[in-house]
Amino acid sequence: MDAFIRFTNQTQGRDRLFRATQYTCMLLRYLLEPKAGKEKVVMKLKELESSVSTGRKWFRLGNVVHAVQATQQSTHATDLVPRVCLTFANLNRVVYFICDTVLWVRSVGLTSGINQEKWRMWAARHYYYSVLLSLVRDLYEISLQMEQVAHDRAKREKSLSQDPLGYSVAKEEREWLQSFLLLFRSLRKHPPLLLDTVKNLCDILNSLDQLGIYKSNPGVIGLGGLVSSIAGIITVACPHMKLKTN
């Protein structure tokens, strides 16, 4: 219970819970819509989804400051590729949160002279760039992990080269199987990297749909958003599972 209280006391924790609720409603609504007699349930899910989405905007109002701080921190990364990717990803997040704040101002009626569709597209575009750059960073980190695992494996095979059985079994593995096993072992050794990659892959589905690059149905978007939200909840609840900047 103490852990749950600490989690919900954090703005990011509450936002992740709201986000998980939002995408769960979307997924359930998609699954129930084709079924007869579920109209009232679908309508309630739609209303809850809309309310939660509006509530999440309150939690994001101060995120511009956090994004600026994250940009400053990412410039100190020692490796060039993560430094460039994360810096530009966080800069795009700054622009995204500015657009999101403008949309919130328009939605609460503080001003009416804002082109809502234009600002929504700008927000979606910069969010897409942010997620894409984060995903590039993940792929780079995966490649480094795979190189390390391959290097360790080569050392083991060299030490076992005097063992005919061990050597023949290694030689019988197909190329595609070797690559898959290499990827699996790399991600298994680095759970934060796996979690971050899954989260970004799921997040990019929503951006591709919003920008019209690749249209998905609400079921796919809802499932992807739910998985991404669960990954986010894990990183907030367990900080050691968050991918660190080298």
Image: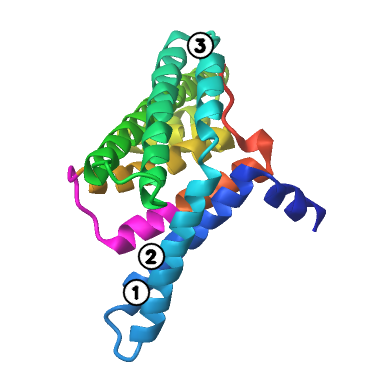
Q: Which residue is mark 2?
A: 26
The answer to which of marks 3 and 2 sits earlier in the sequence is 2
Which class describes the residues within 10 Å of circle 2: few (<14), some (14-19), or many (20+)? many
Mark 3 element type: loop
* The N terminus, quarter of image: bottom right
How far apart marks 3 and 1 lie (CA) works out to: 44 Å
> Where residue 8 appears, x then y in whole percent?
69, 51
Q: Which residue is mark 1?
A: 31
How far apart marks 3 and 2 lie (CA) works out to: 37 Å
The answer to which of marks 3 and 1 sits earlier in the sequence is 1
| 59 relative to 86 in the view: left or right | right
| In this view, the mark in front (3 or 1) | 3
Q: Is residue 81 visible?
A: yes
Q: Amino acid at mark 3?
A: Thr
Q: Which residue is mark 3?
A: 75
The stretch in magenta equals 212-226
> Where residue 143 appears, x then y in whole percent?
42, 23
| In this view, the mark in front (2 or 1) | 2
